[in-house]
Image (spheres, rainbow, N blue to C red):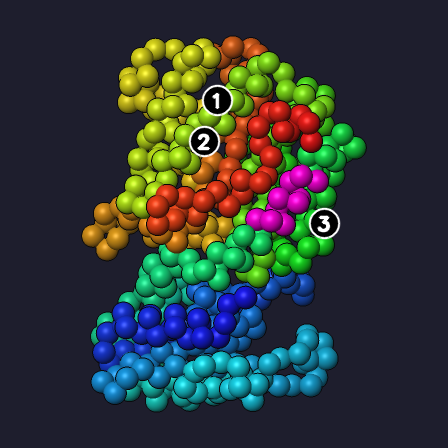
């Protein structure tokens, strides 16, 4: 649980980064139409939630900075019995004043009136350049000379997770562990990819997860060679592997785990060769993680290790350095070694600083490590025994002051563990 004082501290930290005589505007998410008059399940804007912990739509946060200090103003939807009958209870202005540690609370119908006042004499306005809702305020801020992207500042703050954030991520990973273990034990009873997807997402919701953090990937056989395969409708075939990339979102924080398991419970010799190569690379890269290490170093080392392994197995032929220079290995390992993770499964935190220099790892960062090998069934240039096999292994890693903590280490992943499960 994140306390209101932590959200206040985040706002205060953000305010120190704002120019004097400025105003920052952050909007909640809007509902998105699914079809006709039905909507997708609502999910709050991550940056707005990071600064407020407020889950409702039709809300706006202002930070108004002058020489006298900073005023924080929250706008919320007013109470309306008829609307609440259809769409659920609202917190309302009165309860918002009690809950949030802000300077002022108004109902959102007062936004246009109040923001006109707050924008007077401001030299800089901060807002999320991708947010279409800001367009409605253009008549008020068009005379402000400087426009800056508030998302860049908030996203940088999100790089380092607080102890309370880390605890929530651990909870999300614990639930995801239960789901993956259920999938491993249930695979023999399943006939189709969507059977396992249903089991995974049932475990998520049964354990209180808000939702899946992204559309689950349950890719059997050659489907695993499509990186973002989400059809999940293919019948299982004995002898195939199943690549499961699935994680839940708990209290708005994501998990992101991939495991690759055999349909019939046993890996073939060819599958073992590829699987152990990927696993060995993953373990070696994880051991490299510590403060001041750069992600590009992890990426280059993973590419070198995988390329060396593919040469040993006959998937690639030639000198490793020359193959890497020509990017030949990218055909079988086309993606990055990992990404930031937090309020978004691909956390929108920066990888480079304002000077375009890479940001090194630091205590409190959370990232994924996910090497893979993808051998399409139609690739006639590789040994036949490897064709149609796709393998990815992914864990969620916390950078600590002295090294790392594998937050998902309790999810089985060695061949012996999987075959015995």
The answer to whether residue 28 shows anywhere in this view is no
How far, Cα to Cα, is label 3 from label 2? 30 Å
Residue for badge 2: 283
Name the N-terminal-most of marks 2 and 1. 1
Give x and y (percent) for residue 309.
42, 18
Q: Which part of the image, by quadrant, shows the C terminus?
A: top right
* Mark 3 Cα shell of 10 Å, populated few (<14), some (14-19), many (≥20): some
How far, Cα to Cα, is label 2 from label 1? 10 Å
Find residue 199 and report its image quarter: top right
Give x and y (percent) for residue 300.
32, 31
Q: Main secondary structure of the magenta part?
A: helix
Question: What residue sits 58% from the left and 66% below the top?
Answer: 31
Question: What residue sits 30% from the left and 35% below the top?
Answer: 297
Q: Element type at marker 3? A: helix
In this rendering, which labeled residue sits more in front, label 3 or label 1? 1
Give x and y (percent) for residue 360.
29, 46
Q: Element type at marker 2? A: helix
Q: Nearer the viewer, residue 182 or 392?
A: 182
Q: Element type at marker 1? A: helix
The answer to whether residue 383 shows anywhere in this view is yes
How many labels, in total?
3
Q: Is residue 177 magenta?
A: yes
Name the N-terminal-most of marks 3 and 2. 3
**Decide: marks 3, 1 in contact (CB < 8 A)?**
no
In this rendering, which labeled residue sits more in front, label 2 or label 1? 2
> In the image, which residues are magenta?
173-182
Q: Nearer the viewer, residue 400 or 182?
A: 400
Residue for badge 1: 277
**Decide: marks 2, 1 in contact (CB < 8 A)?**
no
């Amino acid at each position: 649980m994140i306390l209101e004082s932590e959200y206040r501290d985040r706002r205060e930290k953000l305010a120190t980064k704002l120019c004097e005589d400025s105003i920052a505007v952050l909007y909640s998410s809007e509902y998105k139409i699914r079809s006709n008059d039905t909507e997708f399940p609502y999910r709050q804007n991550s940056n707005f939630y990071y600064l407020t912990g407020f889950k409702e739509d039709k809300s706006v946060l202002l930070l108004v900075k002058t020489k006298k200090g900073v005023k924080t103003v929250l706008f919320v939807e007013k109470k309306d019995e008829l609307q609440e009958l259809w769409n659920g209870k609202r917190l309302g202005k009165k309860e918002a004043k009690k809950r949030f540690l802000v300077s002022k609370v108004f109902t959102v119908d007062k936004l246009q009136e109040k923001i006109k006042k707050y924008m007077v004499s401001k030299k800089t306005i901060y807002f999320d350049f991708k947010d279409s809702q800001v367009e409605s305020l253009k008549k008020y801020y068009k005379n402000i000379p400087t426009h800056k992207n508030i998302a860049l500042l908030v996203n940088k703050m999100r790089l380092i997770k607080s102890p309370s954030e880390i605890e929530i991520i651990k909870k999300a990973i614990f639930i995801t562990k239960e789901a993956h273990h259920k999938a491993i034990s249930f695979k023999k009873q399943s006939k189709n990819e969507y059977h396992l997807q249903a089991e995974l997402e049932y475990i998520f919701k049964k354990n209180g997860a808000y939702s899946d953090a992204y559309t689950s990937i349950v890719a059997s056989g050659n489907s695993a060679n499509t990186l973002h395969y989400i059809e999940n409708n293919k019948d299982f075939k004995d002898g195939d592997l199943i690549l499961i990339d699935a994680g839940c979102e708990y209290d708005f924080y994501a998990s992101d785990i991939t495991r690759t398991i055999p349909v019939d419970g046993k890996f073939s010799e060819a599958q073992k060769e590829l699987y152990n190569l990927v696993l060995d690379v993953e373990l070696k890269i994880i051991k490299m993680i510590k403060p001041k290490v750069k992600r590009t170093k992890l990426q280059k080392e993973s590419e070198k290790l995988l390329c060396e392994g593919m040469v040993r197995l006959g998937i690639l032929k030639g000198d490793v350095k020359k193959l890497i220079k020509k990017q030949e290995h990218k055909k079988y390992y086309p993606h990055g070694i990992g990404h930031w993770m937090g309020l978004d499964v691909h956390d929108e935190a920066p990888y480079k600083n304002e000077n375009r220099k890479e940001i090194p790892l630091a205590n409190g960062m959370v990232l994924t490590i996910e090497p893979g090998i993808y051998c399409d069934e139609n690739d006639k240039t590789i040994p036949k025994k490897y064709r149609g096999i796709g393998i990815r292994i992914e864990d969620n890693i916390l950078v600590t002051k002295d090294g790392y903590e594998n937050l998902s280490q309790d999810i089985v992943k060695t061949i012996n563990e999987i075959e015995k499960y």
